[in-house]
Amino acid sequence: MVQRSARSKKTLLERESELAAVDEALTELTGLRVDGAESQGRPYDSTAQGRPHGALLAVAGRAGIGKTTLLGEVRRRAAARGCTVLAARGGDQEQRVAFHVARQLLQPQFAGAGEVDLRDQLGSWYDIVGPALGLCAPTDGAPPDPQGLRDGLDWVLTHLAVLRAPMVLVLDDAHWADPESLGWLAAFAPRAEQLPLLVVVAYRPDELPDHAEAFRGLPGRAGGRPLDLEPLSALAVARLVREALGGHADDAFCRECWAVTAGNPFETVELAAKVRDRGVAPTEEAAHLLRDLAAAVKGSGLAARLERLGASAVRFAWACAVLGTEIQPPLAAAVAGVGREEAADAADALRGARILTGVETLEFIHPLIATGVYRAIPPATRVALHGQAAWCVVDGGQGPAAAARHLLETHPEGDPWVVQQLRAAAAETLRSGAPDAARSYLARALREPPPCEDRATVLYELGSASLLTEPATTVNHLRAALEEPIAAPDLRHRIVYRLSQVLAHSDRLAEASDTLAREIRVTGDARVKLRMVAEQFMWDAFRADEPDHPSRSRRMARLADRLTGRDLTERYIIGLRTWDAVLRGEPAHIALHHAERALAGGLGWAEPDRGFEVPVLVALAFMYADRPGRTEELFATGIADFERQGWRGAHLSFAYTLLAYVRFRRGRLAEAEDFVRAGLRLAERVGPGTPAHWYAVGVLVEVLLARGRVGEATRIAEHYSFSAPFPAAVVFPDAQTVHGELLLARGLTKDAAAELAAAGRRLEPRGMRNPSWCPWQLHLARAESHDAPERAVATALEAVGRARQFGAPSAVGQALRLAAEVSSGSARLKLLEESVTHLERSPAAYELACALVSLGTELRRTGSIKEAAEHLYRGLEVAVQCGADGLVNTARDEITAAGLRPRRLHSTETDTLTARERTVAELMIQGRTESEIAHDLRLDEATIVRLLSAVYRKLGTDSTGLPTALKPT
């Protein structure tokens, strides 16, 4: 970066407190004390000083107040202490260039590395962060979601901070940083305290844009407040003036300089330079000239000063202002329309006038000058220069993405070349992970406007770019695209698929289904029609208000039975047939048969232009059929697919949440809680009220109820508004049923009965009668047993019959156990004995523990103490292994009531960590995230979460207590 201040190596005036804060932060970072201004010590050694202690320093102040000079001193002092320094600054003209700041910071650290070296350094993040940082071209696959890209950038910066510690990151003019970079740094900066990383940012508080809300509160979140730079005093201004003009400058003259500049350091230095250049004597008699001289530093005075340099210099300065920062003289000459020699003369003149600095690369001497020159360009000329800059940039081989910011400043003229460049820039930017920037380019292309034959394509691309961030806008664009004349059938089909997808993800499933139904009627291509039928089947399967579920189910069964699975569309239909069999409670072996058929030819979770819903449903079918190991194998593969694509938002949230549900049904409650909380954290990063929230909160409430933490489950439900109105989409576990369970656990039996009966009225007409998928009948029976015990028994026994039809031992065992809960006498005992028999053949450990404790309790009441003891002791041991704390207490109370003594449990747990668990725990203490640890150890994130769960369970702590609980080896 070109140095912008001639005073960078001179003493900063009246900045002692700010420099003291910098020195303190550098000392905490490096462990090196300083004597005077220079470092005295040894190279960085993290083992010698314990955990690294970074920090965030924010420097705030108005333009010209000295932020850049202060940051220059930060860089100098950091380098003197042996720190690696990353530096960048925002630019007024580069705010719309995605990742402009991130590239300045990180790209130099990989300079000169070839593809092989880059892949080795970045590992699995290469294809995700490489395009955003300009290290490689984007791939043709689906782009990463913004959160996945941020996670990748987090990993890169964390990795560099540890590898090249200690490190100082300096960002100047943060108010002009592009939204993508600023959002990433605002989220990352508070983590600096856990790393050998000092982050120093400078900005103008009154010029922070709307998208900088997260950044605006950053210093407070990081535990500090901004260092607000104050104007210089009259004494400091006098010193600056005398340094520039000599010690003979009298007091009255210096005092007038202070009054004219209001203590602004930049304006003071520039004013002194003007006095020297004009040959004005620095005396009281000449003080009246200062206001006119100061006016030449900016505004109209700057424009007049520039005009005096001649037309070529003016044109060249305007071209430089349009290009922004790091200006290449040949490019500026081309934009200005002047020859090489003429451009060189203009640059010399502008350097002499203290407007530009630099030789190989030009910069304005201060952003105030750049802004003043840019604003002085006549509007029509400014538009023309941006258009010329776009053409020159493309002609120079920098590509459409570099030209796009200039085209945004031009007026629409119906130019196909402009549309072509903006579309190309949007495609590249979208694949790099910046959908907002891509959307702005395509919106401008639409205003150009494009040729009639391309308008539908532009609308489709615009809708695709808005998919993740503005679903309502996406719907409007895609519907408008369908209204356009479309010559290519394939384009129309892609628009329909995308429109139905975004409608479904916006909880507008009926509209998604209707959109496909209309297109199916007019589509002639049989394979395309089959694909649309598959899509319609899928969205109807998720509709809670589908009017004719039984008819669709029959049609789908007939179709699926005829298909061989020769392509992905056929396998999707077979997969949907699998899920329909599960919902309807057909025998489990039928569902498993279709699941294996769907998987036979491959069913990837990240297929281009396909959703991940069907592969997930097929995987869950194995869980409901008591083959959770197969489910987890498929989930591990699917999560790896998501992570390779950089899909770390809603996709990964769903995967973790549903994997938690698998663990819950297996009775591994502590691991289930860890996974679902990880899923909920990801859902919160995506945004509130999304389907991912409903899934995650529902599973978390289920897990907490199973662990006996009713109060916490209630607080979670209230915090996330987990109550009516429930989503139009089918979620699992069924949200309304889970809410009914929660009401029941709180003792609100009448409210619970009403909620669960409403769930039944919603699901019964749709043929969703498998109690393994949704046990609403079983919980309704429990709620009814207080006021209508006979009806409760009938309700429960009907659910038992449905469970027997499905045939999975876990389903039958759970149904029998809950039916026993509303029964009495010998019938209760018989139901519990049969429940234990079934559950012993299932993977449902928590259900088995419940059945054993209930059976032991019933035997105790009948006086069969010996048999009761056997079941109670065993139930207690299984409950402990499951992490079902509430059930553990119940079992112990029953053992005491039976007059039995506690028995030492033969737990499989040990307080000794495995080598891998200890490694993961130590990396966690160092401040690494799950994704970073997974990359370093070459494991998937699901495995890391599982290992951490084991660590917390064995040590009896959580992440906050880990540093204390982990004993040194």
Image (cartoon, rainbow, N blue to C red):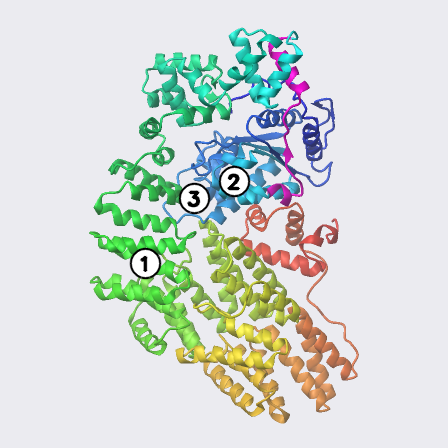
Q: Tell me whether the residue at label 2 lies in contact with that at label 3, contact meaning CB atoms closer than 8 angstroms.
A: no
Q: Which residue is drawn at 74% across and 28% down?
A: 33
Name the one closer to the observer, 733 or 355. 355
Q: Residue at x 36, y 36 (%)?
A: 408
* 3D distance between C-alphas at marks 2 and 1: 34 Å
Q: Which amino acid does label 3 sit on?
A: Ala
Answer with the quarter of the image where residue 514 lies. Answer: bottom left
Numbered range of the magenta stretch: 218-246
Rendered view: 829 above or below 667: below
Mark 3 or mark 1, which is nearer the start of the sequence? 3
Q: Inspect the magenta stretch and tell me whether residue 245 lies in it.
A: yes
Residue corresponding to mark 1: 497
Residue corresponding to mark 2: 182
Q: Is mark 3 on a helix, strand or loop?
A: loop
Mark 3 or mark 2, which is nearer the start of the sequence? 2
Q: Residues within 10 Å of mark 1 (few under 14, many from 20)?
A: many
Coordinates of residue 761 in the picture (x, y in percent):
45, 80
Q: Can residue 206 be seen from the camera position used here?
A: yes
Coordinates of residue 234 in the picture (x, y in percent):
66, 20
Rendered view: 220 above or below 567: above
Name the one closer to the observer, 164 or 60. 60
Mark 1 or mark 2, which is nearer the start of the sequence? 2
Residue corresponding to mark 3: 434
Coordinates of residue 20 in the picture (x, y in percent):
71, 29
Rendered view: 702 above or below 469: below
Q: Is residue 70 left or right of residue 365?
A: right
Q: What element carries label 1?
A: helix
Q: Tell me whether the residue at label 2 lies in contact with that at label 1, contact meaning CB atoms closer than 8 angstroms.
A: no
Q: Inspect the magenta stretch and tell me whether residue 19 lies in it.
A: no
Q: Which amino acid does label 2 sit on?
A: Leu
Q: What element carries label 2?
A: helix
